[in-house]
Image (tube, rainbow, N blue to C red):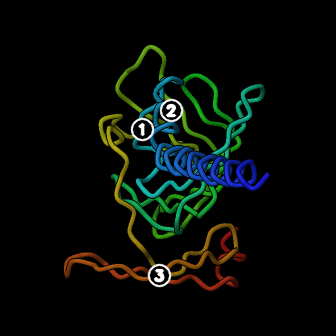
Amino acid sequence: MQMGSRKSRSLLVLLAGVLSVIAASSAAQSSDSFYSLLRAHGLPIGLVPQNITNFMLDQTSGRFEVYLDRSCSAKFESEVHYETNVTGTLTYGQIGDLSGMSAQELFLWFPVKGIRVDVPTTGLIYFDVGGVVSKQFSLSLFDAPPECVDRGPVEVDDQTIRVSRFKRRAEEPQLRYIEKKAMRTAS
């Protein structure tokens, strides 16, 4: 009876070890898998920064959630801010119902509502910024996931998003904070 008990414990320890290795390898592959998913839908992998920790996808609806290790910003032709949770609906060549991303336009921050590429490709990608303007960029800017850096607080749609400071070069302008009162009167 003691022999069976030892074998059971050994088997449980082995099983626990195998499961932890599988869990660790799937967590390490989560960002690679999301980038592969973007490619499979005709989108560039540079839409989401390098710091993905996990993601979920509803295969039926195309609804996804991407989790980042921190909120941060990346610089393309414009600055784009990512919250720790980015969600949207993925279809071929576009992401709709997007939340968790914002873009700076004329010193103001607006939510990015959607992203699309032309099919067949024209080499351009379009961001629907706040439902107000469509920004177009060269698709080549999004060839690789950007390095995301910490920033200061940003106001988007009358809400403050907390982000920490990053190192700036001397020639870059200071980020100006807009009071909520000023945002309300501007709209």
Q: Is residue 186 left or right of residue 137?
A: right
Residue indicated by mark 1: 45
Q: Is residue 78 left or right of residue 81?
A: left
| SS under mark 2 | helix
**The disc label shown at residue 38, or none:** 2
Q: Counting other residues with Cα less than 10 Å from the Cα at mark 3, is it few (<14), some (14-19), or many (20 or more)? A: few
Label 3 or label 2, whichever comes before in sequence order: 2
Figure disc tally = 3
The answer to the question of whether label 1 and label 2 lie on touching residues, with beta carbons closer than 8 A, is: yes
Label 3 or label 1, whichever comes before in sequence order: 1
Quadrant of the rendering where the C terminus is positioned: bottom right
What's under tag 3, amino acid-wise?
Answer: Ser
What's under tag 1, amino acid-wise?
Answer: Ile
Q: CA distance from mark 1 to mark 2?
A: 6 Å
Q: Is residue 120 above or below residue 24?
A: above
Q: Is residue 12 above or below residue 34?
A: below
Residue indicated by mark 3: 164
Q: Counting other residues with Cα less than 10 Å from the Cα at mark 1, is it few (<14), some (14-19), or many (20 or more)? A: many
